[in-house]
């Protein structure tokens, strides 16, 4: 899947991505889910795999910039 990084909190090591720039549900991702370890900047387009976390909510894994 593809999405856009819309928020990132460097102190806490997590952010959110959105499927497109329109309103919609943002999906959580942790810095450990970013391939290569360098978090893409806000407004970057990324590819990712969506999985269900332990809390039952969707989360992005294998996040990589395009």
Image (cartoon, rainbow, N blue to C red):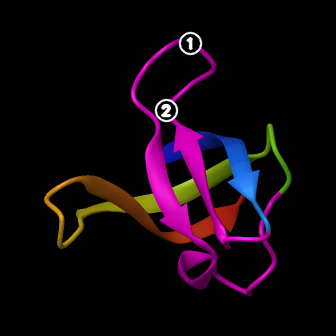
Which mark, by number, is residue 32? none
Look at the image and tell me whether residue 1 can be seen. no
Q: What residue is shown with label 2? A: 19
Magenta segment:
11-40
Q: Residue at x 46, y 54 (%)?
A: 28
Q: Position of residue 66 (x, y in %)?
A: 73, 56
Task: Relative to 44, say whether 34 is above or below.
Answer: below
Q: Residue at x 26, y 64 (%)?
A: 51
As drawn, is 4 to the left or to the right of 36?
left
Q: Residue at x 57, y 48 (%)?
A: 16
Q: Quadrant of residue 30?
A: bottom right
Main SS, magenta residues: loop
For label 1, the SS is loop
Q: What residue is shown with label 1? A: 22
Look at the image and tell me whether residue 58 can be seen. yes
Q: Position of residue 10 (x, y in %)?
A: 79, 67
Q: How many marks?
A: 2
Q: Quadrant of residue 56?
A: bottom left
Crowd class of label 1 (few under 14; some 14 to 19; many from 20; radius 10 Å): few
As drawn, is 25 to the left or to the right of 54?
right
- How far apart, in angstroms, are the residues tagged by discs 1 and 2? 8 Å
Q: Is residue 37 magenta?
A: yes
For label 2, the SS is loop
Q: Is residue 43 magenta?
A: no
Q: Position of residue 22 (x, y in %)?
A: 56, 12
């Amino acid at each position: 899947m593809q999405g856009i990084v819309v928020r990132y909190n460097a102190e806490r090591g997590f952010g959110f991505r959105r499927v497109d720039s329109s309103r919609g549900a943002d999906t959580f991702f942790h810095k450990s889910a970013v391939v290569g370890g360098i978090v893409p900047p806000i407004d970057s387009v990324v590819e990712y795999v969506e999985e269900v976390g332990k809390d039952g909510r969707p989360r992005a894994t294998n996040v990589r910039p395009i």
